[in-house]
Image: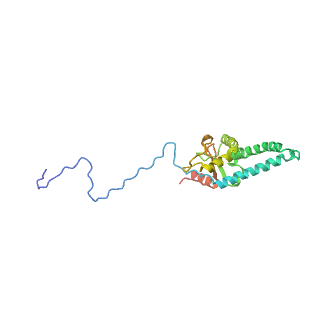
């Protein structure tokens, strides 16, 4: 179609006019991430305490357990007492101390005696709170049932490679999805450093 001035006029398209060549386009704004239902965005959970720290805590617990059981059974042991009788006398106080330390003291103070000395706290997942009594009892019973097999699991894990993680060629299957790693918590608990737990709770109390 031509105009009275002899210039050809083109019709405007129905859609928006495209920008001229060489014109910079405005940057597209990315939509804000929307958290999935039931998974709010919050501070990351504190990582698990290092192996050396946890093993030292276990060693301290065993040391205090043996000292306490020995002091309690010493009045009932003499030169005529056989080895079997001595082991039987030690079993009762050792189990009682283990229950008091791993269950009751952890429920009150957040960790057993050895873990308190090594700066470790036991938390429940996924809320990083203090574990309930039933969880601690179940963890204690699992520990008693798996304790005699820990040397075998450790030897098998050493011979077959890492027991867990992406590099594990032959994971060792244990009850409730545990692996052959020593001192694995089967009840949804985690041992963390006290400083990491304090930083996590500060972040939860005063979010940025």
Task: Tell me if 55 is positioned left or right of 16 in this view.
Answer: right
- Residue at (71%, 49%) from the top-left corner? 112
Residue 128: x and y in percent read 60, 47
> Does residue 107 sit above or below 118 in this rendering?
above
Residue 22: x and y in percent read 28, 59
Residue 122: x and y in percent read 65, 48
Residue 42: x and y in percent read 53, 49
Task: Tell me if 80 is positioned left or right of 190 in this view.
Answer: right
Depth check: give the residue in front, 94 or 178: 178
Image quarter for residue 131? top right
Residue at the bottom extreme of this rendering: 22
- Residue at (69%, 48%) from the top-left corner? 109
Image quarter for residue 26? bottom left
Residue at the front extreme of this rendering: 159
Depth check: give the residue in front, 170 or 207: 170
Q: How many marks?
A: 0
């Amino acid at each position: 179609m031509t105009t009275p001035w002899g210039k050809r006029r083109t019709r405007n398209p129905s859609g928006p006019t495209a920008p001229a060549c060489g014109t910079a386009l405005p940057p597209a704004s990315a939509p804000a991430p929307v958290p999935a239902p039931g998974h709010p965005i919050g501070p990351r959970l504190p990582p698990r305490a290092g192996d050396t720290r946890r093993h030292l805590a276990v060693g301290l617990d065993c040391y205090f357990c043996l000292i306490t059981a020995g002091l309690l059974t010493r009045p009932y042991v003499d030169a005529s007492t056989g080895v079997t009788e001595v082991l039987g006398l030690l079993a009762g106080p050792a189990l009682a101390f283990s229950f008091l330390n791993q269950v009751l003291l952890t429920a009150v103070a957040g960790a057993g005696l050895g873990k308190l000395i090594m700066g470790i706290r036991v938390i429940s997942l996924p809320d990083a709170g203090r574990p309930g009594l039933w969880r601690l009892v179940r963890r204690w019973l699992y520990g008693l049932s798996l304790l005699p097999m820990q040397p075998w699991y450790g030897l098998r894990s050493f011979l077959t490679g890492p027991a867990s993680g992406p590099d594990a060629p032959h994971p060792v299957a244990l009850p409730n999805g545990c692996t052959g790693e020593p001192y694995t918590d089967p009840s949804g608990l985690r041992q963390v450093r006290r400083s990491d737990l304090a930083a996590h709770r500060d972040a939860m109390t005063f979010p940025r």
